[in-house]
Image (cartoon, rainbow, N blue to C red):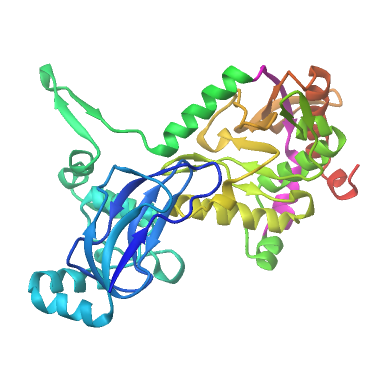
């Protein structure tokens, strides 16, 4: 019995997807729930599994082609008997199918890196959960190879083309991913549709640093997660948003839409580009819950397994360029949000306290905001409130 493999229903606001890679070829046997094809959308990679055991008969769309919801991706012959017959008719197919069955399960991002590098994934020891291979494992394997081999990925990548030019110089043309295209569109949209201004301040993180040193071990032992700086910033942002609700609002035509909830977007770098997963109802989360969610999102971003629910919505965003060494920047709004907080590097600097010069861990903060609905006074006071809450973290517990 022939079965049609269709494009799954795409989330709202997503009109189409691109064929990223096929994991099986016509004539190969497949098992139920085995991933047959990866579809790339503006935000995430969708894995389309086999509905049941059988043999892949025909592929309707090639890699790089665009598909829409309910399009027929491929045809397969259902039933274990069909799979057995197909395997028996061709020894090479049987051999390839057996090899595929023995291959470790890889996320789309890891699979792409493996394919580009030419490394056999069965030779890589996974450090992820249940021995799963993560991106860092593949990168370590690439680094361990001889220089000649490590240099091959760029030359063998299917999507890239290299062209020699005079004096031995080389240029490489690589198509932008759908995610990168969408990020570019949204950033340009924000610049063209919002009146973006940025206000700056600096914060003394000595009190927060002292708390982290004092309770780091007991916190990690109890909650099985590291006590980082981000949970303090999320908590401070939520309290400041409560005091200045206009910062948490958005423009809706000629109206201002005030949100009575606090869904905080945390900008995360992934192999496919910048993504902003959402901490929903952040005002109801504990420090430990915030750190756990951020860790989970970071792992999902590396493995390419973030879902649309993880990325949809958000009323305010926080981005931390400091992890890359940024000292100061002007973050761009994440539409339709009206403001975004930028964190930066923590640097030991001389400060004057009570008439004496002392060394303190200082960070520059930047708040970019849409001046169409947010006045400068509110933006400045909002940022000052975050500064005060972080310099006296006890206020976060008392909510004052």
Task: Say which of 212 and 35 sits in front.
Answer: 35
- Residue 320 picture location, percent across and down: 59, 36
- Residue 362 picture location, percent across and down: 69, 31
| Residue 379 relative to residue 272: left or right | right
| Residue 173 relative to residue 298: left or right | left
Residue 367 shown in magenta: no
User: At 74% across and 51% down in the image, what residue appears?
Assistant: 281
Magenta region: which residues?
A: 194-216
- Residue 46 picture location, percent across and down: 43, 54
- Residue 348 picture location, percent across and down: 64, 31
Q: Quadrant of residue 177?
A: top left
In the image, residue 242 sits, relative to residue 130, either above or below, namely above
User: At 56% across and 57% down in the image, what residue appears?
Assistant: 296
In the image, residue 345 sits, relative to residue 169, either above or below, namely below
Q: Quadrant of residue 285?
A: bottom right
Residue 280 seen in the current view: yes
Residue 226 seen in the current view: no
Residue 196 shown in magenta: yes
In which quadrant of the rendered image does the C terminus lie? top right
């Amino acid at each position: 019995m022939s079965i049609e493999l269709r494009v799954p229903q795409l989330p709202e606001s997503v009109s189409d997807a691109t064929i990223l890679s096929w994991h099986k070829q016509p004539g190969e046997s497949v098992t139920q729930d085995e991933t047959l094809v990866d579809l790339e959308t503006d935000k995430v990679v969708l894995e389309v599994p086999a509905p049941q055991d059988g043999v892949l008969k025909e592929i309707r769309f090639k890699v790089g082609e665009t598909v829409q919801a309910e399009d027929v991706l491929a045809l397969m012959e259902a039933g274990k008997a069909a799979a057995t017959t197909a395997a028996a008719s061709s020894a090479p197919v049987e051999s390839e199918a057996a090899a595929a069955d023995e291959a470790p399960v890889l996320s789309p991002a890891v699979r792409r890196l493996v394919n580009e590098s030419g490394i056999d994934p069965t030779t890589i020891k996974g450090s992820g959960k249940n021995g799963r291979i993560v991106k860092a494992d593949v990168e370590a394997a690439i680094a361990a190879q001889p220089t000649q081999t490590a240099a091959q990925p760029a030359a063998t990548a299917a999507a890239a083309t290299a062209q020699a030019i005079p004096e031995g110089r080389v240029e490489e043309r690589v198509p932008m991913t759908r995610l990168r295209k969408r990020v570019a569109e949204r950033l340009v949209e924000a610049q063209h549709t919002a009146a973006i201004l940025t206000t700056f301040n600096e914060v003394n993180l000595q009190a927060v640093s002292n708390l982290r040193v004092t309770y780091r071990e007991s916190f990690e032992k109890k909650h099985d997660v590291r006590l980082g700086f981000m949970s303090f910033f999320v908590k401070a942002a939520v309290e400041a948003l409560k005091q200045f609700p206009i910062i948490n609002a958005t423009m809706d035509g000629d109206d201002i839409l005030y949100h009575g909830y606090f869904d905080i977007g945390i900008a995360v770098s992934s192999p496919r580009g910048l993504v902003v997963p959402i901490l929903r109802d952040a005002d109801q989360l504990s420090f430990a819950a915030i750190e756990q969610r951020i860790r989970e999102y970071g792992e999902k971003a590396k493995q390419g397994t973030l879902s649309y629910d993880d990325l949809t919505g958000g009323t305010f965003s926080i981005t931390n360029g400091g992890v890359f060494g940024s000292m100061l920047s002007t973050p761009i709004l994440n539409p339709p949000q009206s403001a975004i907080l930028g964190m930066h590097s923590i640097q030991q600097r001389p400060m004057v306290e009570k008439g004496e010069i002392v060394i303190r861990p200082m960070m520059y903060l930047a708040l970019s905001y849409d001046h169409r609905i947010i006045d400068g006074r509110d933006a400045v006071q909002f940022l000052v409130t975050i500064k005060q809450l972080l310099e006296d973290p006890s206020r976060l517990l008392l909510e004052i």
